[in-house]
Image (cartoon, rainbow, N blue to C red):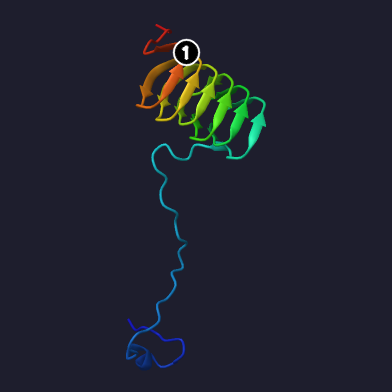
Amino acid sequence: MAIWDKTESSPTAATTAPNPAPQASAQPVQPPAPKAGAGKEESLIASGITVEGKINGKGSVRVAGKFKGDIHVDGDLHIDAAASVDGQVQAGEVTINGSLQGNIQNAKHVELKQGSTVTGDIKAGSLSVTAGARMRGNVDFGFNESK
């Protein structure tokens, strides 16, 4: 099979060319495959933003700013380090790096990271607390009340 140089019409000239130019691939570039758990829709309240209201839905929520109101989602809730939430929370998995003033109800898992602050009660299937996290309230975890 001969390599053809588009500037020359002779097949022998193309095969003797020292370094033919690379040809572009006709196939589209595929993005990397998503990681496990990726693909979930996540709404973001960006840092510097303050929102007051109520959130209900099936997706996940990440709060990087300030939110005042109740959050009830089927997905996960992440509260970033400089963020704060003032309200009742019901979500699948709750990860807190910032501040929460309110109760967490019926979560599958709650994780309190270093520097987080929770003022309220937690009711979850499981709980992880990193050294440096602070909490004031009652905790109920590890019990499955449906039995």
- Number of callouts in the render? 1
Task: Residue 55 in the image: state x and y as whole percent.
Answer: 62, 26
Query: Is 39 on the left or on the right of 15, as rendered?
Result: right
Circle 1: element type: loop
Q: Give 41 or 88, whichever is nearer the viewer.
A: 88
Q: Residue at x 38, y 27 (%)?
A: 132
63 vs 127: above or below = below
Q: Is residue 109 left or right of residue 45?
A: left
The residue pinned by badge 1 equals 137
Residue located at (32% from left, 91% from top): 16
**Image quarter of residue 102:** top right
Above-or-below relation of 22 to 102: below
x and y percentages locating residue 28 in the rendered image: 47, 62
At horizontal 37% and vertical 23% (from top left) the residue drawn is 129
Judging depth in this view, the residue of 30 and 120 nearest the camera is 120
Say which of 32 and 99 sits in front: 99
Q: Of all residues shown, which one is farthest toward the right?
A: 53
Q: Is residue 59 visible?
A: no
In the picture, measured across the screen, residue 86 lies left or right of residue 144, that is: right
Q: Position of residue 97 (x, y in %)?
A: 46, 31
Q: Quadrant of the C terminus?
A: top left
Residue depicted at 43% across the width and 22% down the height = 134
Q: Is residue 47 left or right of residue 111?
A: right
The answer to whether 22 is drawn above or below residue 121 in the figure is: below
User: What is the x, y in percent for residue 32?
Assistant: 41, 52
10 Å neighbourhood of mark 1: few (<14), some, or many (≥20)?
few
- The amino acid on which the numbered mark 1 sits, given as a three-letter code, is Gly
